[in-house]
Image (cartoon, grey):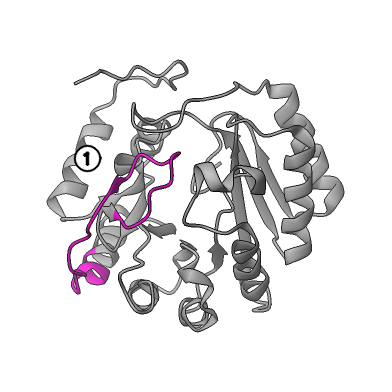
Amino acid sequence: MQKFVPKIKKRWPLSVKVKEMEDFISGMGLNTVCEEASCPNKGECFAKNRVTFLILGSVCTRSCLFCGVTKGRPARIDVNEPQRISQAIEILGLKEAVITSVTRDDLADGGASHFREVVKTIKALNNDVAVEVLTPDFKGEFSSIETVLKSSPDVFSHNVETVPRLYPEIRPEAQYLRSLRVLEFSSSFSDIKTKSGLMVGMGEEVKEVEDVMAALKKSGCDIITIGQYLRPGVKEVEVKEYIPEKIFKHYEEVGKDLGFDEVYSSTFVRSSYRY
């Protein structure tokens, strides 16, 4: 098997805490996007007692070419997962919890009811925990989105990931306008922050990113993240360009001018990264 060596790799000091977190997550029978998606921030986050939980299994029904998560036929939903996640949050003493998932197009509601159970279970155990959900598009079904929103997360996040021109290549089963509609619908719940993110370095132009940022603000997004795409493995699309920090700074300024409440733009920024 071909060994993949990334050209840019985030380095962190070796830490016993990282191994302890890995063992803890494994022992609880849970998945994290930190591990499944080969996130470059994993070592830093684990060392600081931070984690992004991946629910609905670890196998995705879609085949996005930027993502390192396993694609294929998912297993059945683990009905005990919400309780185990809540217990993990309590044991770790987390004040903020980020919950994301694989896409489950095989489920009637896309897994929305499971998201609801996870959020409700966390809040029931400790209502002071701030919960952010990072969801798939649920095929644009407003009923599924509403199911998640009515569980009262503190932040509802859905990523557009890239510019619309690259969707046919990078996200063949997704639709840019559908994702904007998801965000527009979520922003109608005024007490819940709406968030989205995209990666750069996949062949987009600066003007295209600026246009996406403007469209996200128009859809009602409060928070935006922009980070460098880093190829997670040999099966994923190659990096077309490594974006200099001055361009990330430019995007930050554009976001501020557009009126976003929060803008995070830098090489290692990720949508669920605790900046």
Q: Is residue 131 left or right of residue 90?
A: right
Indicate whether 78 appears above or below 109.
Answer: above
Indicate whether 247 appears above or below 81.
Answer: above
Which SS class for mark 1? helix
Q: Is residue 231 left or right of residue 168?
A: left
Residue displayed at 59% across by 53% down: 160
Residue displayed at 43% across by 40% down: 65
Indicate whether 31 appears above or below 246.
Answer: below
Instruction: Give the x, y percent position of residue 260.
Output: 76, 54
Magenta range: 60-84
Q: Quickly name the residue at label 1.
A: 22
Question: Which quarter of the figure has residue 93?
Answer: bottom left
Residue displayed at 57% across by 59% down: 175
Magenta stretch contains residue 75: yes
Quadrant of the drawing holding the N terminus = top left
Instruction: Give the x, y percent position of residue 126.
Output: 38, 72
